[in-house]
């Protein structure tokens, strides 16, 4: 048996009564009691998540922007203001998704990148391999000295300002999807819940104190269970479920993150242009009773598809899903989903399903 | 919450209560609901259906996962608890009150052969290690 990796907040989770699970090799809290209560807590007030398993990577040196223009499907040239963030996929030459990530433009010799936990080692190896031939002078540094805490919900920012003296002045005017440094910390107005809030990077040694300070101000801890239902309601993809190396971003609801208009070349571009998508990601709302789950077959008049992420939506009190279906399937269509020995009816809907405290369906 | 002494238990984490009319009520145990978390959907077997012992016959789904429920003994389904359709969370709140369905056992002696509370607790403890 391999030992699970622990974040600096492991002891704090246990002290708060977390139910811990093996999450891709990390010992992480799935909930601290009721997942549904935690979900509502974030939509209605605010909560905090330990996301220290995600990896921060600093890319530094002359020409870092030009390298990212080539490395990523979204265009780093969209970032002109220091602190501004951009969501992108990183593709294989055949268009398959290696990972999805966020890049922050700090200055012309420094971009900060946040990648998924389960893909971090593979991502960094890929970045280094590409840099070796295209930008050998760049340094690529995984920041395992940084922990990350997400505070999300309508009251999240105010709670952070209460818990962290001096943070309000620096971050009050931070526009969504941008970040600012505060000493050794890094405050980003980003998240994975469809709510306002911050993701804060903080030195590992200071993380337990910050977590405790937030708890003292009444911020409730939220497990990875609620993180998944929040992101699904918000219509945000999960790497490994909604896309992976076998599909391209155009078939994964991520066309908006792929810049095919500019003349720049990037890894995967030729493959995307050569193979127009025949499938797409669609939102499903179950109209029968039951719960949609990943890998269930979807039957449409245009052919078969498959659910990539499915769950019960605590906000809508119905089951919802993302499904990869033939491109001809349209919003409003009724489809059937194989659930055990039954065929259940679901409607194709526009997603996100819920954001900013409200259901959108 | 401890497991009530007056119930019988299965290795698939159902509890079984013998009623005055000779039927048995079936639900899932405290341990099972704890593992599954917040319940959001319950599907009981059809009334009149005959079940073999250990046959898959019902489903409970939490936010997290779906789990099958098995017939503890052979018999015929006599009633389903339709109240759970609208409030599956009662299984989390009071698993030993939230019965899912009732059945008339083919052989009442089968029920007494199931685990008692102490044996079930030993079984749960052994599964955890």
Image (cartoon, grey):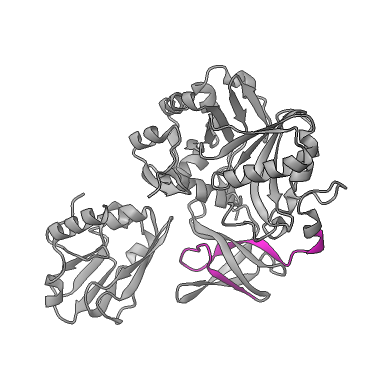
- The answer to whether residue A228 is above or below residue B15 is above
Q: Quadrant of residue B40?
A: bottom left
User: Does A63 lie within the magenta span?
Assistant: no
On the picture, is A267 further left or further right than A213? Answer: right
Residue sitting at x 45%, y 76%: A341
Residue sitting at x 59%, y 39%: A191
Q: Quadrant of residue A275?
A: bottom right
Q: In x, y percent, where is residue A76? A: 77, 39
- The answer to whether residue A322 is above or below residue A153 is below
A127 or A278: nearer the eye? Answer: A127
Check the image and name the residue furthest to the top.
Answer: A166
Query: Which range of residues does the magenta coloring cover?
Result: A273-300
Count of numbered marks: 0
On the picture, is B2 further left or further right than A205? Answer: left
A287 or B13: nearer the eye? Answer: B13
Does residue A61 appear in the picture of this structure? yes
Does residue B44 appear in the picture of this structure? no
Q: In x, y percent, where is residue B36? A: 36, 56
Q: In x, y percent, where is residue A52? A: 51, 36
User: Does A281 lie within the magenta span?
Assistant: yes
Residue sitting at x 27%, y 53%: B128
Q: In x, y percent, where is residue A227? A: 50, 45
- The answer to whether residue A144 is above or below residue A278 is above
On the picture, is A193 further left or further right than B24? Answer: right
């Amino acid at each position: 048996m391999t030992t699970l990796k622990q974040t600096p907040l492991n002891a704090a989770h246990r002290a708060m009564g977390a139910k811990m699970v093996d999450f891709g090799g990390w010992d992480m809290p799935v909930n601290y009691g009721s997942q549904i209560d935690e979900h509502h807590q974030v939509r209605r007030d605010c909560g905090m998540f330990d996301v220290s398993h995600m990896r921060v990577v600093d890319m530094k040196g002359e020409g870092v922007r030009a390298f990212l223009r080539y490395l990523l499907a979204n265009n780093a040239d969209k970032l002109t203001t220091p602190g501004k963030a951009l969501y992108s996929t990183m593709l294989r030459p055949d268009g398959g998704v290696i990972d999805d990530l966020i890049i922050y433009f700090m200055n012309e010799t420094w971009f900060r990148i946040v990648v998924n936990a389960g893909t971090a080692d593979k991502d960094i190896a890929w970045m280094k391999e590409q840099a070796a031939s295209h930008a050998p002078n760049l340094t690529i540094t995984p920041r395992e000295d940084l922990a990350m805490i997400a505070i999300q919900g309508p009251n999240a920012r105010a709670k952070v300002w209460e818990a962290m003296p001096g943070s309000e002045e620096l971050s009050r005017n931070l526009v969504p999807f941008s970040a600012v440094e505060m000493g050794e910390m890094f405050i980003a107005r980003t998240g994975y819940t469809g709510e306002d809030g911050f993701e804060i990077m903080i030195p590992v040694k200071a993380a337990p104190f910050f977590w405790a300070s937030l708890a003292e101000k009444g911020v409730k801890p939220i497990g990875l269970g609620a993180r998944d239902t929040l992101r699904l309601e918000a219509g945000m993809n999960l790497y490994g479920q909604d896309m992976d190396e076998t599909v391209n971003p155009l078939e994964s609801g991520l066309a908006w993150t792929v810049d095919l208009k500019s003349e720049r070349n990037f890894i995967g571009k030729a493959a995307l242009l050569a193979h127009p998508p025949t499938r797409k990601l669609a939102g499903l709302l179950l109209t029968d009773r039951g719960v949609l789950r990943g890998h269930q077959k979807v039957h449409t008049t245009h052919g078969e598809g498959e659910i990539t992420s499915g769950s019960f939506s605590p906000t809508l009190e119905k089951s919802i899903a993302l499904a990869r279906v033939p491109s001809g399937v349209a919003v409003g269509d009724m489809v059937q989903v194989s659930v055990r020995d039954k065929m259940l009816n679901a409607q194709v809907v526009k997603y996100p399903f819920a954001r900013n405290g409200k259901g959108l369906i | 919450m401890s497991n009530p002494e007056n119930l019988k238990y299965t290795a698939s984490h159902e509890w079984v209560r013998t009623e005055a009319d000779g039927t048995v009520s079936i639900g899932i145990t405290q341990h099972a609901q704890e593992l599954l978390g917040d319940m959001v959907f319950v599907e009981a077997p059809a009334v009149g259906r005959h079940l073999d012992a250990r046959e898959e016959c019902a489903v409970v789904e939490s936010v997290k996962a779906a789990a099958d429920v098995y017939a503890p003994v052979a018999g015929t389904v006599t009633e389903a608890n339709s109240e759970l359709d609208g409030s599956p969370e009662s299984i989390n709140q009071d698993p030993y009150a939230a019965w899912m369905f009732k059945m008339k056992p083919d052989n009442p002696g089968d029920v007494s052969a199931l685990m008692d509370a102490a044996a079930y607790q030993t079984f749960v403890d052994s599964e955890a290690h």
